[in-house]
């Protein structure tokens, strides 16, 4: 299924702090033919569906429905489609899903920064939640880096555009990306192994084994490994080439069906990614090698501010002897889903999730041959979540009721030694934060058929968040009496060595000095009303209005010194969204067309502002 969406927005910069009104007219013309594999079948064709698109089933409303029966702009990528299009990473879906982008900066496994319909937030700190909610097997992933992983043995991926605050809840003001891995199959024993080799010594191995022991128990084990050499040559040859990346992941899934009405599926996975940073950068200001004066970058005789010249392409420099920054991340994930058909009309679902995530990244932040800046990010977190919901179908009404609980702890540690090879001893920037998060929510959604052609949908969600942070951002000079040739052990990231220095700037935001500002206890509510009209079979016309929220939080990391304590916390973001659209197949099994338009009105829009050497959300 080919889905395209275009948008145009108008907003006032003067109103951005308190409100952002964006009029975004979106039109998505979807023409899907069997031979066009852009956005694909969510299920394999059944024997009686040998031609045409077949029925595309999604769970955008927490239950299985036909894609053309729901009033949501959705892009669906099946497992077969992901494989056919060689979509091997969770972030690669932006190549197939219209109006979806990702600007993660550290590479596989380290972070994501998704944008849907232009809604995003360019803060890469692990204690900051994004406005695009990422789900893996019905489990919300708090840390954005946990949403970067290899895609293999997948059932499908669903991209939901627009606020999804009623059923998905937390921080989905821009939309939801839901990755659904393959379930074990009962009574089937099968497997698959694939190998790939490509340029730059790329080699990829993937496979799965499914053991269906009976109609009551099935086990599925799958794995992925890939390695690729760097694509940026290191000229002196004493360091690895830039851009090298290696990923490995394994997943096991066990499904048990003790009775005809109860099914339980447990999925456990572990993944690791590592690599080396690139080594060519874009210099903005160059230097005249004769007199040291600065001038624009386009002069072919210019050198960068550290004295290193071009590499054969205007404006680009080689960092030659520069070290290769290491980057690595690992994630452990577990999800347990229990479905109980309590009666013909009632289904109870429990989803329990757990995730541990760690990233260890050294960023070359000066871009020169000299090692003048190398920021170390050493972050880790864990989270636990529990959702319990009931789906009730009675007469003309379909009701979803549920509750949600989330607990998370995150530790952020950032160290940046600066100018230690400049002969002046240098300085060290050190930022550290520990944050606790606890959230509760209850939600309800009612679909009521006024007539066979007309349905009204009303939903609501109430939530309460508690956040607590202790953090500091300090600047250290070398200790008094230090060896001038080695004032700090070169590029130390050890706490004991840093604390031997002289603190020249100290900014603390903690229990001792924040006066309670480092604690947030905030309630919120989301709501939605929608009207669906089906004039003929295969056609849906819908209009809806919704209110969504993004939780408040705290600024942390390398923010500029001297901020008032009141500027560390930032307020809850609120969106009022209005949308209308049409979906139709024109009575043909070969075509699916979708047209939608929307209007967003933001209050207290959370935007990242760069101030000095740091940044802050306001």
Image (cartoon, rainbow, N blue to C red):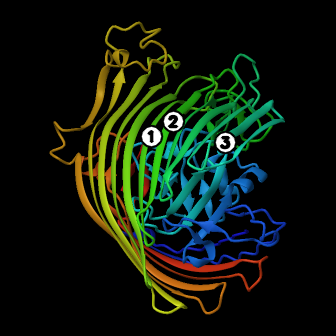
Task: Please state if 538 lies on the left or on the right of 10 as rendered.
Answer: right
> For the residues carrying marks 2 and 3, which lies nearer the camera in this image?
3
- Indicate which disc, 1 or 2, sits on the residue closer to the N terminus: 2
Residue 304 at least partly seen: no
Task: Please state if 543 lies on the left or on the right of 587 as rendered.
Answer: left
Q: x, y percentage for residue 230?
A: 73, 30
Marking on residue 210: 3
Q: x, y percentage for residue 81?
A: 74, 56
- Indicate which disc, 2 or 3, sits on the residue closer to the N terminus: 3
Task: Please state if 507 lies on the left or on the right of 276 as rendered.
Answer: left
Total number of numbered labels? 3
Q: Residue at x 61, y 46 (%)?
A: 214
Task: Determine the image quadrant of residue 118.
Answer: bottom right
Residue 281 at least partly seen: yes
Q: CA distance from mark 2 to mark 3?
A: 24 Å
Location of residue 576 with respect to 203 vertically, above or below: below
Task: Determine the image quadrant of residue 576.
Answer: bottom left
Marking on residue 331: 2
For disc 3, the neighbor class at 10 Å (few under 14, some 14 to 19, many from 20) is many
Q: Residue at x 46, y 67 (%)?
A: 164
For disc 2, the neighbor class at 10 Å (few under 14, some 14 to 19, many from 20) is many
- Indicate which disc, 1 or 3, sits on the residue closer to the N terminus: 3
Q: x, y percentage for residue 21?
A: 44, 75
- Residue at image mark 1: 355
């Amino acid at each position: 299924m080919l889905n395209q969406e275009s948008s145009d927005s108008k907003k006032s910069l003067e109103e951005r702090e308190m409100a952002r009104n964006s009029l975004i007219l979106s039109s998505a013309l979807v023409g899907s033919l069997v031979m066009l594999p852009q956005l694909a079948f969510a299920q394999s064709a059944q024997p009686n569906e040998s031609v045409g698109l077949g029925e595309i089933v999604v769970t955008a409303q927490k239950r299985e429905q036909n894609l053309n029966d729901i009033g949501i702009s959705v892009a669906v990528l099946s497992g077969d489609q992901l494989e056919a299009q060689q979509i091997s990473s969770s972030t690669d879906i932006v190549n197939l899903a219209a109006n979806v982008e990702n600007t993660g900066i550290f590479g596989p496994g380290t972070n994501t920064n998704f944008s849907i319909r232009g809604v995003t937030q360019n803060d890469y700190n692990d204690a900051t939640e994004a406005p695009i909610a990422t789900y893996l097997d019905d489990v919300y992933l708090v840390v954005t880096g946990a949403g970067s992983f290899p895609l293999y043995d997948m059932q499908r991926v669903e991209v939901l555009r627009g606020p999804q605050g009623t059923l998905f809840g937390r921080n989905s003001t821009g939309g939801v990306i839901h990755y659904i891995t393959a379930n074990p199959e009962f009574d089937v024993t099968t497997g698959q192994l694939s190998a790939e080799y490509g340029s730059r010594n790329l080699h990829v191995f993937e496979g799965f084994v499914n053991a269906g022991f009976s109609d009551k128990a099935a086990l599925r084990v799958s794995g992925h490994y890939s390695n690729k050499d760097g694509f940026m040559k290191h000229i002196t040859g004493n360091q690895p080439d830039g851009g090298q990346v290696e990923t490995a992941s394994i997943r096991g899934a066990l499904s048990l069906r003790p009775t005809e009405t109860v099914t339980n599926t447990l999925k456990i996975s572990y993944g690791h990614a590592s690599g080396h940073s690139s080594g060519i950068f874009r210099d903005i200001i160059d230097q005249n090698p004769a007199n040291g004066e600065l001038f624009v970058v386009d002069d072919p005789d210019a050198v960068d501010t550290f004295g290193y010249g071009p590499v054969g392409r205007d404006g680009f420099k080689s960092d030659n002897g520069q070290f290769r920054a290491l980057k690595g991340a690992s994630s452990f994930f577990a999800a347990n889903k229990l479905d109980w058909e309590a009666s013909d009309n009632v289904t109870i679902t429990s989803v329990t999730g757990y995730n541990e995530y760690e990233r260890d990244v050294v960023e070359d932040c000066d871009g020169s041959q000299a090692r003048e800046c190398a920021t170390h990010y050493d972050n880790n977190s864990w989270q636990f979540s529990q959702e319990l919901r009931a789906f009730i179908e009675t007469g003309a009404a379909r009701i979803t009721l549920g509750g949600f609980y989330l607990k998370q702890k995150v530790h952020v540690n950032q160290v940046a030694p600066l100018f230690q090879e400049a002969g002046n001893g240098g300085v060290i920037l050190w930022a550290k934060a520990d944050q606790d998060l606890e959230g509760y929510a209850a939600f309800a959604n009612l679909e009521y058929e006024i007539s066979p052609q007309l349905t009204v949908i009303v939903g609501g969600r109430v939530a309460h968040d508690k956040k607590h942070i202790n953090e500091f951002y300090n600047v250290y000079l070398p200790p008094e009496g230090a060896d001038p040739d080695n004032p700090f052990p070169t590029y130390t990231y050890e706490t004991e060595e840093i604390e031997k220095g002289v603190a020249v700037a100290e900014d603390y935001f903690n229990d001792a000095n924040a006066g309670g500002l480092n604690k947030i206890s905030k309630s919120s509510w989301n709501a939605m009303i929608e009207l669906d009209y089906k004039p003929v079979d295969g056609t849906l016309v819908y209009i809806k209005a919704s209110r969504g929220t993004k939780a408040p939080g705290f600024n942390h990391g390398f923010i500029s010194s001297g901020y008032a304590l009141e500027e560390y916390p930032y307020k809850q973001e609120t969106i009022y969204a209005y949308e209308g659209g049409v979906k139709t197949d024109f009575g043909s099994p070969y075509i699916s067309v979708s047209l939608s338009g929307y209007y967003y009105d933001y209050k207290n829009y959370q935007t990242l502002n760069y101030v000095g050497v740091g940044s802050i959300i306001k």
